[in-house]
Amino acid sequence: MEQDSTARIDAGLRAWIAAAPPGSQLPSSRTLVAQYGASPVTVQKAMRRLAAAGLIESRPGVGTFIRTLRSPRPADHGWQTSALGTPPARVSVLSSTQRTVAPDAIGLHSGYPASDLLPERLVRAALARAARSRAAVMRSPAAGMPELQEWFAGELAASAPAGVVPPSARDVVITSGSQGGLSSIFRGLVGPGQPLLIESPSYWGAMLAAEQTGVVLVPVTSGAEGPDPDEVDRALARTGARVFYAQPTFANPTGARWSTENARAILDVVRRRGAFLIEDDWAHDLAIDVEPVPLASSDDEGHVIYLRSLTKSVSPAVRVAALVARGPARERILTDRAAESMYVSGVLQSAALDVVTQPAWRTHLRGVRQQLRARRDLLLDSVSAHAPSAHIDITPGGGLNLWARLPDGTDTALLVREAEARGLIVAPGGEWFPAEPPAPYIRLNYASEDPRRFPEAAQILGEALEHVAGSADPRPPQPAS
């Protein structure tokens, strides 16, 4: 019944928009509720459809208006096609996770937590103190602020088992977010035209950094407990690769966590092959059910290059990360970082150190853990109730995302468009595969949206899946005559 009412309002408003001049103000929500005898929620759904279609625009504090053209004719940028040439495989379009959306849409596509999951007061106070300190006018060392280097080294050393020499502050290189660290690792340790093993699926940003460096990606299938160690061994032997990029803990996008047995076996393979394992511990501070223990804490021979970012746990505005590497590998990476960006802002480093050394930081993390658990479970339950054909195999023990397998044959691009037309933004799973996706997937972020809207989001997803399934042609293709 509600769906019929939404469609009726949508059709009526489209007819009104077609007859009215551009820039006209739409009737108020109260007027539309009375005119169509519908609920305010139904009216808002219809308005979201029109906004997603680009027909209307909302002006906060003023009202909703028919969208007007900003210029008399579309700009012609065709000349850039010849100037730019053929694009690398993954840089022709912006990732779906970086899109901006209508303010009233339900956004489950983002790669970041909502602001209410961040230590906002700590961050604001830390930035104010940093701005008054010498860091505001001083150049930082190329490898980073010594005190921050020491903190990252201490965090890793706290997990080191007996008999393993923990890293020192000198082994740490501070970077402006993990993305810059990945680029330097790929340039310094792999190089153009050389193979890089990578889990499939894996973080799209790592694939982007690798491909911009000219690295050749070699996918290795990874499941709920990580990749098969024998397959990793065979891939290293077959390709001659000497570097394996992986996310052993709360992988993005799947949420998978390597089993203890797999982690040990893969580390043994890497050591035996004389290779490097890049351990991207992106969600270290976003644990829910288990405490993360980095593989790097068990390695003192320099085989594991460890990467940890504070961007998602402290603030997206405080782009500070660290990589831990030993021996000549560390020097190569540091040289590349210095050539790329010279150094990381001292103000941001000082603010990050201020936040993570406050007593309230640990209290904040405990509270975030509870909130992430509640949001994860609510979205799981909502999808199960309203979109059961979107199957979620892994209940992540941390991180931000659910990885949903769609029915075979689902047109993922069509599903994403249909969901957006109904007011829900999701990320298509193809972006996380270094080769062709073996099945249709979508990624759902349970930390980026008001959880009270999760049941509505799941209902929209279910409706979109039904619509896409119903629009598919069930007849097999006919041979050409």
Image (spheres, helix red, strand yellow):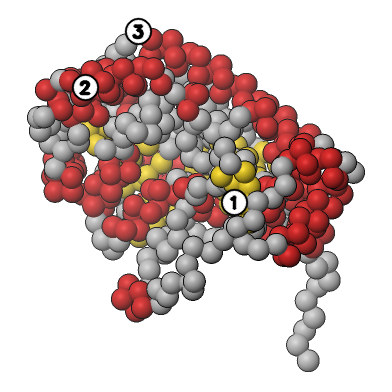
Q: Amino acid at mark 1?
A: Glu
At a point 43% along the width and 10% down the height, the residue shown is 363
> Which-is-in-front pick, marks 3 and 1?
1
Q: Is residue 336 visible?
A: no
What residue is disc 2 on?
Answer: 130
What is the distance, in whole Å, between disc 3 and disc 1 at their CAs?
45 Å
Q: How many marks?
A: 3
Location of residue 50 in the rendering, given as x and y in whole percent from the top left corner: 68, 54
Of residues 478 and 165, the one drawn nearer to the viewer in this rendering: 478
- Which numbered tag is attached to residue 359? 3
Q: Disc 3, disc 1: CB below 8 Å?
A: no
Q: Which mark, by number, is residue 57?
A: 1
- Quarter residue 127 falls in: top left
Estimate the x, y position of residue 425 in percent, counting from the top left: 61, 46
Q: Please give the label number shown on residue 396.
A: none
Q: The disc labelled 2 sits on which kind of residue?
A: Ala
Between tags 2 and 3, which lies in front?
Answer: 2
As shown in the figure, which amino acid type bears the numbered disc 3? Pro
